[in-house]
Amino acid sequence: MAAMSRALRIEQALRAHFQPTLIEVNDDSAHHAGHAGASPAGETHFSVTLVSSAFNGLSRVARSRAVYSVLNPELQEGLHALALTLRTPEELIGLSNG
């Protein structure tokens, strides 16, 4: 059986912890080839969009810290960079109505 991709592991960890209404995990590693922290094997740079009511009342920094805490095992195993978009469902609705 093939090993689970890092993108899928990230998605599963974030789903389990934040119960998001929307989640998108994109492997951007190919765009960072040759940059610091990039691996020829890829799976080092990701962008994540996460919408969850778990972010209610949390600052941007607190939201990022919560995500980094959940993904710490991946960071210890070669995940180098995350671009995070973290919203509450109400913030997402506000963006679509604005």
Image (cartoon, helix red, strand yellow):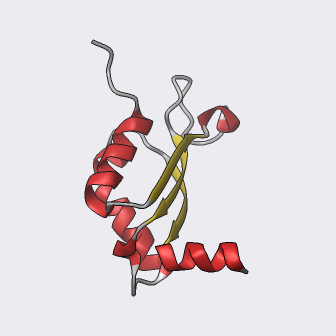
| Relative vertical location of residue 65 with respect to residue 34 in this rendering, above or below | below
Is residue 82 found left or right of 1 in the rendered image?
Answer: right
Quadrant where the N terminus is found in the figure? top left
Seen as rendered, the residue at the extreme right is: 98
Question: Residue 92: horizontal and vertical position, in percent?
Answer: 57, 72
Question: Residue 68: horizontal and vertical position, in percent?
Answer: 38, 60
Quadrant where the C terminus is found in the figure? bottom right
- Answer yes or no: is residue 71 visible: no
Residue at the image position 69 percent from the left and 78 percent from the top: 97
Residue at the image position 32 percent from the left and 44 percent from the top: 12
Residue at the image position 39 percent from the left and 36 percent from the top: 8
Question: Residue 24: horizontal and vertical position, in percent?
Answer: 52, 49
Q: Quadrant of residue 78?
A: top left
In this figure, what is the number of numbered marks? 0
Residue at the image position 47 percent from the left and 53 percent from the top: 23
Compare residues 79 and 59 and report the one nearer the observer. 59
| Relative vertical location of residue 30 with respect to residue 80 in this rendering, above or below | above
- Answer yes or no: is residue 6 visible: yes
Seen as rendered, the residue at the extreme front is: 97
Question: Residue 66: horizontal and vertical position, in percent?
Answer: 34, 68
Compare residues 68 and 22 and report the one nearer the observer. 22
Q: Quadrant of residue 94?
A: bottom right
Seen as rendered, the residue at the extreme bottom is: 57
| Relative vertical location of residue 41 with respect to residue 16 in this rendering, above or below | above
Q: Quadrant of residue 17?
A: bottom left
Is residue 32 found left or right of 6 in the rendered image?
Answer: right
